[in-house]
Amino acid sequence: MSDFESLELRGVGRRFGGVDALSGLDLTIKSGEFVALLGPSGCGKSTALNCLAGLLPLTHGEILLDGRRIDTLPPERRGFGMVFQSYALFPHLSVEKNVAFGLQMQGLPRAEIDSRVREAISLVKLGEHAKKLPGQLSGGQQQRVAIARAVVLEPSLVLMDEPLSNLDAKLRLDMRTEIRRLHQSLGLTTIYVTHDQEEALSLADRLVVMREGRVQQVGTPDELYESPTSWYVADFMGYRNILPATVVSTSAGEAVVELPGTAGGGDGARLTGRAVGGLAAGDDVRVAIRPEDFVLVSSGVSAGSPTGRAAGSIPGAVSVVEYHGREHAVGVQTGDTMLHARTPAAPQVGAPVSLTAPVERVLVFPEALDAVVPQEVAA
């Protein structure tokens, strides 16, 4: 369905009242890609999407489609489809009339409109609901109508702004599958805004992690999951344990760090991890460890299967245990910090424990995010 080769954003920015909501966004998107813009509220991801759609004019930069500048065009002349968080359906129009609306505005023949509407409604599996009003549909069904209304226009690009945030957990999972299926089966090019890292990882070919209007890292889900370039990106990629520390020494790409005082008081625990970026003794850093990489040791018994060289040991006490089916989520209080681990067996609340992890699964980042140079944006 996509009829272009590449979309380029060059130095795109948007300022509100003297404050940059988006600054220096450089990104090239190839036809057929699924790109997710990821970050917390206020990071600039929705601003970027609205600039692309033409709903916000650029303060600086330009947007080019196959080398042709389009940021000066009104939204209706860009040929993009848009799926909003709020669905934005006409409540007094049936499903098929909502889907047909954009085609009618284009003045297409009635027979062509009817054919394309039937096909779009069938694609989102709402054939039996075509005559219903939006108010008669579930949230997931309304979102499917919004998607059908976007794809029926056969857009060169589909823009989705947190389309699943209003749905319950099960519907979000179902709709994630549906969106990915439609993207692949129709050959769409999709830009998708979300604050949910699991959603982004499951859907996108590439992720763009943003902070305060600027890109922090761009890469495939695997690249960002395994090799975040800052603790900020690591936090979004599931490294739930982000701990302040100080570098004691460095050697051969590794750093020995000391954490603040732990549950027993006195000096903090020491850990060895992979150094990400240039580090030196005395530097303030952040240590990132995934819950599933922690190994919990209680009364000399290890609840897990450590592999490789151990990074060190952090003492603490079990504060909370949550049952998650085949495993348990365990909160371990160490000083003023709650650490998060996952174990196959449930420890006793209040039990003294220690936590360790393989050295290669412990990442040590510079504290200052300004010291991080975003990786080069690649198509």
Image (spheres, grey):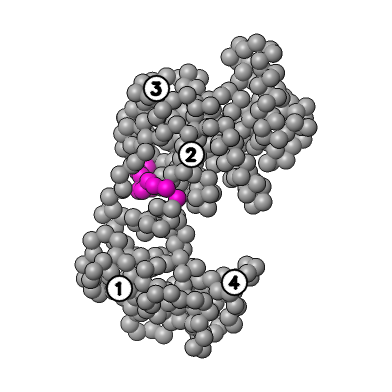
Q: CA distance from mark 3 to mark 4?
A: 51 Å
Give the residue type that dot 2 points to. Answer: Phe
Q: Is residue 203 left or right of residue 4?
A: right
> What kind of secondary structure does the magenta stretch mostly adopt?
strand
Quadrant location of residue 252? bottom left
Rendered location of residue 322, percent (x, y): 61, 71
Give the residue type that dot 3 points to. Answer: Ile
| Earlier residue among tags 3 and 1 | 3
Q: Is residue 17 left or right of residue 252?
A: right
Image quadrant in which the C terminus is located:
top left
- Tag 1, which secondary structure? strand
Mark 3 and mark 1 residues within 8 Å of each other at the beta carbon: no
| Earlier residue among tags 1 and 2 | 2
| Earlier residue among tags 3 and 4 | 3
Disc number for residue 190:
none
Question: Where does the magenta region start and end?
Answer: 211-221
Q: Residues within 10 Å of mark 3 (few under 14, many from 20)?
A: some
The residue that disc 3 covers is 70
The residue that disc 1 covers is 257
Disc number for residue 34:
2
Quadrant location of residue 57? top left
Which label lies toward us, 3 or 2? 2
Residue situated in front as seen by the camera: 11 or 262? 11
Q: Residue at x 37, y 56 (%)?
A: 228
Q: CA distance from mark 3 to mark 2?
A: 20 Å
Q: Residues within 10 Å of mark 2 (few under 14, many from 20)?
A: many
| Earlier residue among tags 4 and 2 | 2
- Tag 4, which secondary structure? strand
